[in-house]
């Protein structure tokens, strides 16, 4: 992970979560009591040994900025070059705000270049799951991939809410469709399921920068990873699928997109039982303790900030 930088997309408006997002960005919405949705992804970063993370913000970011500053900046060792750095749109590459997920990363291409990483992990700040990104990076390196997508199986009748991939028997990606109404894709490991993208990507830095620059020059692009970047790389680069390994240690894989009020409510209820479906209890150090273990052993949550 020392040669890796994370880019956490946290600028979403979360319109389907209104009124919870009336005054704050979707990743800053409270979750599990006094935590925030973004804490789950940041905890995954810490526990994966990913200590250099750019957090891209945009929509009503005051609450989110304060939460990151008060709850997370003290967890990483800044004196060792580690950081959780907030990057609002600064119009450095043009006169526009972030126009899509790919454009958000493109507008911060100089920040990526200043770190000179070998690999970049693209993450979303609005999903609930536990994952060790270092396992995925090891897989990316071992398979000599240019791009690796984290995937999980879903029923075919749910494909309209996901980017779905066609995966070969050797796990190489041969097709990609962003939120199709239906698809003929089926998982080679389960013919009754479709492999869906989790919105977690690992890029070789050179591959990422070239694709972002090419996409930025296309006036017809939506400047989105799912709609543009990933489909444009099919057949030109080695793209691999990485099957989600759930660190939640339950019988069923746990990954939730809390993009609607019903999904948000259900995910919160998953925390409430004596043996919760999604477990937040396996914390191995006090929340306020500054972490020095590399990598840490288990799940940790950041210190909650104010509203």
Image (cartoon, rainbow, N blue to C red):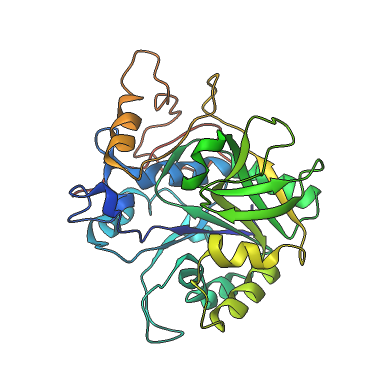
Left or right side of 113 for 18: left
Of residue 120 and residue 197, the one placed in the foreground of this image is: 197
Residue 256: quarter of image:
top left
Judge whether 27 appears above or below 188 on screen.
below
Snapshot quadrant of residue 10: bottom left
Residue found at x 36% / y 64%:
57
Residue 123's x, y, as percent? Answer: 51, 53
Q: Nearer the viewer, residue 5 or 215?
A: 215
User: Do we see residue 109 in this rendering?
Assistant: yes
Residue at image position (53%, 78%) is 110
- Residue 115, given in percent of the width and then of the height, sits at 58, 70
Q: Say left or right for 176 vs 87.
A: right
Residue drawn at the location 80% of the way across and 48% of the way down: 142
Let me know if residue 294 appears in the view.
Answer: no
Whether 136 is drawn above or below 95: the answer is: above
Q: Residue at x 56, y 84 (%)?
A: 217
Total labels: the figure holds: 0
């Amino acid at each position: 992970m020392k040669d890796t930088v994370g880019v956490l997309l946290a600028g979403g408006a979360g319109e389907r979560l209104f009124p919870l997002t009336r005054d704050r960005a979707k990743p800053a919405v409270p979750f599990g009591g006094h935590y925030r949705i973004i804490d789950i992804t940041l905890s995954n970063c810490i526990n994966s040994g990913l200590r250099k993370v750019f957090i891209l913000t945009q929509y009503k970011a005051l609450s989110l900025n304060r939460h990151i500053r008060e709850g997370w900046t003290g967890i990483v060792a800044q004196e060792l070059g580690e950081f959780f750095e907030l990057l609002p749109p600064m119009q450095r590459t043009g006169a526009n705000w972030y126009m899509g997920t790919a454009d958000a990363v493109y507008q911060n291409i100089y920040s990526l270049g200043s770190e000179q990483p070998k690999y970049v992990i693209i993450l979303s700040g609005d999903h609930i799951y536990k994952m060790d990104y270092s396992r995925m990076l090891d897989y990316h390196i071992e398979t000599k991939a240019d791009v690796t997508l984290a995937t999980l199986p879903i029923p075919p009748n749910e494909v309209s809410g996901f980017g779905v991939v066609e995966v070969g028997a050797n796990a190489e990606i041969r097709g990609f469709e962003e939120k199709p109404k239906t698809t003929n894709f089926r998982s080679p490991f389960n013919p009754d399921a479709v492999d869906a993208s989790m919105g977690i990507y690992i890029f070789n830095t050179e591959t990422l920068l070239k694709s972002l620059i090419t996409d930025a020059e296309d006036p017809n692009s939506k400047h989105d990873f799912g709609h543009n970047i990933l489909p444009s790389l099919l057949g030109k680069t080695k793209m691999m699928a990485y099957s989600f390994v759930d660190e939640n240690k339950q019988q069923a894989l746990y990954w939730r997109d809390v993009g609607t009020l019903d999904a948000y409510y259900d995910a919160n209820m998953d925390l409430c039982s004596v043996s919760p479906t999604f477990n937040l209890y396996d914390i191995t150090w006090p929340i306020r303790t500054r972490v020095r273990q590399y990598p840490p052993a288990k799940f940790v949550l950041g210190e909650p900030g104010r509203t």
